[in-house]
Image: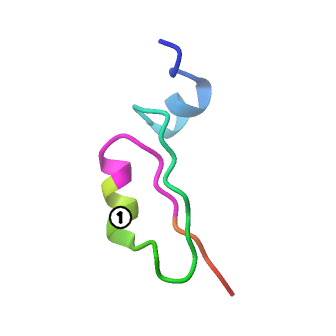
Amino acid sequence: MWYETRISERFGINYPIVQAGMAGGSTTAELVASVSNAGGLGTLGLGI
């Protein structure tokens, strides 16, 4: 399929969905885990 790429295979991503890493408390570990468990790529932002 069109969404099967080397990156999606390497990271085990089923769907080409990337959850944006939003710093400042908008993203939680639970949200990242939910996106990842659903087949997307969850990311956790860091702001200093």
Pick the residue in front: 13 or 25. 25
Please state, as top left, top right, bottom left or bottom right, where the C terminus lies in the image: bottom right
Disc 1 is placed on an element classified as helix
Asked if residue 38 lies in the magenta stretch, the reply is yes
Residue at the top extreme?
1
Mark 1: few/some/many CA within 10 Å (<14, 14-19, 20+): some
Residue at position x 52%, y 60% in the image: 43
46 to 36, vertically: above or below: below
Residue at position x 38%, y 50% in the image: 36
Residue at position x 46%, y 55% in the image: 42
Residue at the bottom extreme?
48
Residue at the right extreme?
48
Asked if residue 16 lies in the magenta stretch, the reply is no
Pick the residue in front: 12 or 1. 1
Q: Is residue 12 left or right of residue 38?
A: right
User: Which residues, given as a range, are shown in magenta?
Assistant: 35-43
Amino acid at dot 1? Leu
17 to 34, vertically: above or below: above
Q: How many marks?
A: 1
Q: Mark 1 points at which residue?
A: 31
- In percent of width and height, residue 20 lies at 54, 58
Residue at position x 56%, y 64% in the image: 21
Task: Please tell me whether the stretch drawn in magenta is mainly helix, strand or loop.
Answer: loop
- In percent of width and height, residue 8 lies at 52, 32
46 to 16, vertically: above or below: below
- In percent of width and height, residue 47 lies at 65, 82
- In percent of width and height, residue 26 lies at 46, 76
User: How is the rendered protein coloured?
Assistant: rainbow
| Occupied quadrant, residue 29 | bottom left
